[in-house]
Amino acid sequence: MRLAALACVRAVALGVACATGASAASPSAAASAQGGPPALSTLPAVPIPAANPPNEAKLQLGRMLFFDARLSGDGSTSCASCHVPQHGWAHGDALARGYPGHRLWRNNPTVLNAAYRRRLMWDGSLDSLEAQARAAMQAPVEGNGKATMIEMRLRLVPEYRDLFCRAFGDAWPQLDHAWQAIAAYERTLVSDPRQVPFDRYLAGDREALSASARRGLALFEGRAGCIQCHHGALASDEGFHALGVPRQPQFDSHPLVQIAVRWQNVQRGAADATGAGHDGDLGRWYTTRDGADIGRFRTPTLRELVYTAPYMHNGVFGTLREVVDFFDAGGGSTPNKSPLLRALGLSEQDKSDLVAFLESMSSERPRVVDAPRLPPLQPLGDAVACAPPQAGSEGGPAAGSASERP
Ligand code: HEC
Ligand code: HEC
């Protein structure tokens, strides 16, 4: 309860609507009651920004656009190419594939439950799903789409004209509204607590966790100290920490990855134009330019991990057991290493218990949707601008835009 209420206070402060969901008092609340870190908790209601309320047409449009590769430059890459529903809305590659001819330098995070995030990306460089969608489709190494070109494409799809009209009152599809529709759709991609054993446990069903997972929970909150950084509804403090995760071997062996790393460092001002200066990932530093943030990455959510391997910002660990071994050793080595990490001395049994507990935070069945049928481009012919519906007729827009024919 307490955490859901806190999330709401924060949501209101950010100017977004918020309602407390049915959130059960946590049997694991003991830690926070004694002034320790907040307890693990169930997900509250999704915060919805006042500027982008959902309506039926918008969600339908957002779902289609998420799967529509025509948002990318050469029509090859959609959001779902990298955030694959069957892979927990992440991707099985250690480092994300990029726009054809590219490779990226980081692992794909899941979009499931991203709606709850205060900051997005491994380094927290973006703060809204709307801005994130725009960045993803226009970045040269991801979607590589040119804004006016994508907008023209959308305008030549009659079904999209109709949906933008009903969702936003657009006379002709507006690209910024495409990002809003995708973001609105992403806010529906959240874990179903009835599917997640740990959420059922929090709701009072003690049998929802195996004995091993219950021991794992006790370690997580106790001797292993995971709760210090992994707490709340996402099992993340939303903070940034340097753990000394090992360097991804592809940084030294894969030419396309080396191009990506050098390009990122030039773009973000950590290397000179020749690419000399830095050939790693500085994490949070790129946003804050604070030396103390070098090597710090955002604490990931621990929900849905069963489907989102491999792990860490650089996908260097293939299994949860490897991650637990890493923490057991007290993390790796890096100048800004978090003082919260120390060797844990876990037994074999402890390690499997921790893994069993981590697995209990995933849905029993993956949340999968079929790719929607995508409507074809049609010659413009004598198409006319749509007449926006009256406000309130489908929860639709208050005022329509009145742009001219494309
Ligand atoms: C080429 C692969 C690729 C494509 C295409 C792509 N993404 Fe991503 N996405 C990534 C990677 C990699 C990251 C993490 C990047 C980072 O941290 O620097 C990411 C991060 C995100 C995040 C942040 C998640 C979090 O927990 O912070 C969201 C949300 C997201 N993508 C949604 C989208 C949407 C929506 C689209 C389509 C408009 C899209 N992505 C297209 C690879 C991709
Ligand atoms: C000092 C804060 C901190 C502590 C303590 C901590 N973690 Fe983490 N954890 C993080 C951060 C930050 C990352 C991401 C690091 C990166 O990619 O560089 C992470 C990554 C992970 C991941 C990978 C998730 C993914 O999607 O890639 C798992 C699993 C995990 N931690 C579990 C644990 C467990 C289990 C413990 C206790 C044994 C623990 N953590 C202790 C901060 C912490």
Image: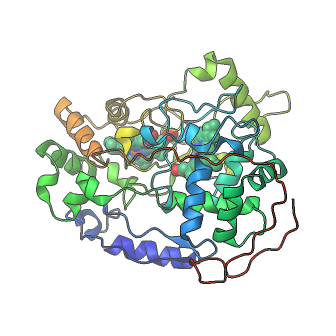
Q: Is residue 341 left or right of residue 374?
A: left
Q: Position of residue 202 (x, y in %)?
A: 22, 62
From the image, which quarter does the N terminus lie in? bottom left
Query: Which of the colour schemes (rainbow, by chain, secondary structure, one colour) is used?
Result: rainbow
Residue 244 pos. (x, y %): 50, 35
Which image quarter has ligand 1? top right
At horizontal 59% and vertical 49% (from top left) the residue drawn is 66
The image shows residue 31 at horizontal and vertical percentages of 26, 63
> Is residue 45 in view from this perspective?
yes
Q: Quadrant of the C terminus?
A: bottom right
Q: Quadrant of residue 87?
A: top left
At x 73%, y 81%, the residue is 399
Q: Is residue 338 visible?
A: no
Q: Against 62, is 219 above or below?
A: above
Q: Residue furthest front?
A: 382
Residue sitting nearer the eye, 89 or 306: 89
Q: Is residue 181 above or below residue 306?
A: below
- Vertical position of residue 190 compared to residue 358: above or below: below
The foreground one among 99 and 369 is: 369
Q: Quadrant of residue 321?
A: top left
Would residue 306 appear left or right of 211 to someone viewing this image? Answer: right
- Residue 46 image offset from top left, x and y in percent: 45, 67
Tell which of 354 and 117 is nearer to you: 117
Residue at 50%, 32% in the rendered image: 315
Total number of numbered labels? 0
Query: Which residue sits at x=47%, y=61%?
Result: 188
| Left or right, 259 with reference to 250 | right
Picture quadrant where residue 6 is located: bottom left
